[in-house]
Each structure stands twice: as C-alpha cells, then as structure tokens.
Amino acid sequence: MSGVWAVLVAAGRGERLGGERPKAFVELAGRSLLAEALERLDGCPWVDGIVVAAPPGWEEPAILVAEELGAGKVSACVTGGTRSRAESVRICVAEVPDGADTIMVHDAARPLVTDAVVERLLAALREGWDGAVPGLPIPDTIKRVRDRAVVETLDRSGLVAVQTPQAFRAVVLREALAAIGDDATDDAAIVERHGGRVCVVEGDPGLLKVTTAVDLEAVERLLAG
Ligand code: C5P
C-alpha cells in the first residue's frame, strides 16, 4: 500500500453554529458539510484512501453519507475525540495504513476543497518539504490585546491565514503526533514543534471555514455560483 491518504475530521460539536446536530451534519444547499467535503476528497484523483472521524453516536450516519455518495475510498469511519480536534486527528491517523507515504488532514468544516489546492500541497511535498499548508494574505490589521488594551500591532506583511487541507510526509506526522500533546488547533504546528519543515502554498478564498450561520450562508452562495 502506498500513496496519499486523507483524514477528514468531522467530530466537533460546532456549538457556535447552534442547532441540534453536530456541525458536519448541518446542511448546506440540501446536503451536509460532511457530504460536500467527502465527495470532493473521494473524487480527487490524487487521494487513495480516506478515514473519517465522526462525533460519538454519529458514526452510523457518517457511514451512510459515504454509502449514499458511493465514496469508495473511505476505509474507516471512527469515533473522533471528545477533548480536542487534535485527538480526532490522532485517532484517524492510527487508522491510516503503514504504507501510506502522505497524510492530508482536512476539516469537514471547510467543505469547498478543490483538486487544485491538493495538487499544490502535494507538489510542495515532492519538492522535499515535510509538510505543506494553504495560506492566504491577511487583509485585516492584526493586534495582540490583553484586557482590552492593545499591546502590539503585528506587521501583517509576513503573516498568512492558514487553511486545511494540510499535507504531510506520513512518517513525520506520525512521529510528531507521538511526541506532542493534543492541544494544537493546527496540524502543521504539531509538525513544526517537532522540527518539521513546513511550507505555505497558495490557499483558496473559497475554502471558507464554517463557524457561524453567516459562514454557512457564504458557502451556500459560493456553491450556487
Ligand atoms: O471546532 P472547529 O470548527 O475549529 O473544528 C474544526 C474541525 O475539527 C471540524 O471539522 C470539526 O468537526 C473537527 N473536530 C473534530 N473533533 C473535535 C473537535 C473538532 O473532529 N473534538
């Protein structure tokens, strides 16, 4: 077994979105965020296998989503972590076959993943990087604030906003996950802390992260074209 495996984490509760169901099962334009992301990853020509993390109790519905899509690359649908996203990533990575050379971690909360972004990430790994992340320039000025008081205004010229999917040499991601705790919100940060070399490739403004109802409407508008 070799190739590129995608880990799709969908186990968050999504409290900021409100509603009855976990965020990945919230519908946009008649289908769930999970279905949209899964269909795109399954259809991506460079992805060989997929592991999905579902919230506890939502494993069966997640399997049903994969079956309804005919997403034949899904090899496992596991119960994600209840403590953190990184825990869900760790559980999924343990399900990826040992022979996989690349692991790409993606959030169901960013449904509009494209082949073009995946291609840029994989090209960076072929150049010899341990990891690659999509990044976009930051239009807003960023300030560090403590107790409402501004303590620093950052020079935004050197800053990027980072998205998922994030791709890694499998061996490097596995080593970093084994060595480092579950507190990081960003997979690349785990690899960086473990000494991995991570590069930024061009992100995609359409790869919006759904956090609030306003984000959901924005993604729906993008889908409607
Ligand atoms: O909460 P947030 O929106 O930052 O979560 C990002 C992604 O991580 C979502 O796709 C969510 O389903 C996933 N997640 C997870 N397990 C957790 C927390 C979040 O799979 N415990």
Image (cartoon, grey):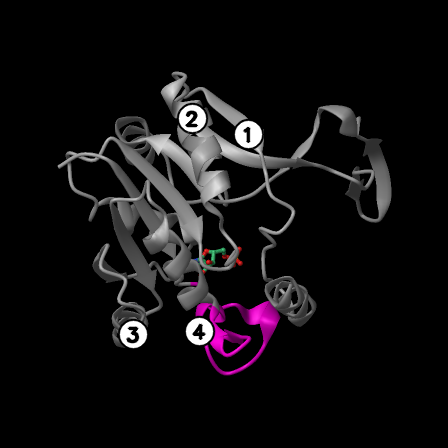
Most foreground residue, 167 or 183: 167
Which residue has dot 4 on it? 25
* Foreground: disc 1 or disc 4: 1
Task: First in sequence, mark 1 or 4: give its number.
Answer: 4
Residue 83 can be seen in this image = no
Which residue has dot 3 on it? 68
In what quadrant of the picture does the N terminus appear?
top left
Q: Secondary structure at mark 2?
A: helix
Most foreground residue, 39 or 102: 39
Residue 172 coordinates in the image, percent (x, y): 31, 26
Instruction: Judge whether 156 appears above or below 210 on screen.
Output: above
* Foreground: disc 2 or disc 4: 2
Q: Is residue 23 magenta?
A: yes
Task: Say what amino acid the circle numbered 2 marks.
Answer: Ala
Alpha carbon distance from label 3 to label 4: 14 Å
Task: First in sequence, mark 3 or 1: give its number.
Answer: 3
Is the residue under label 4 in contact with that under label 2 (CB below 8 Å)? no
Identified at 28% across, 29% down, the residue is: 175
Instruction: Judge whether 69 appears above or below 186 on screen.
Output: below
Which residue has dot 2 on it? 123
Residue extending farthest bottom: 20
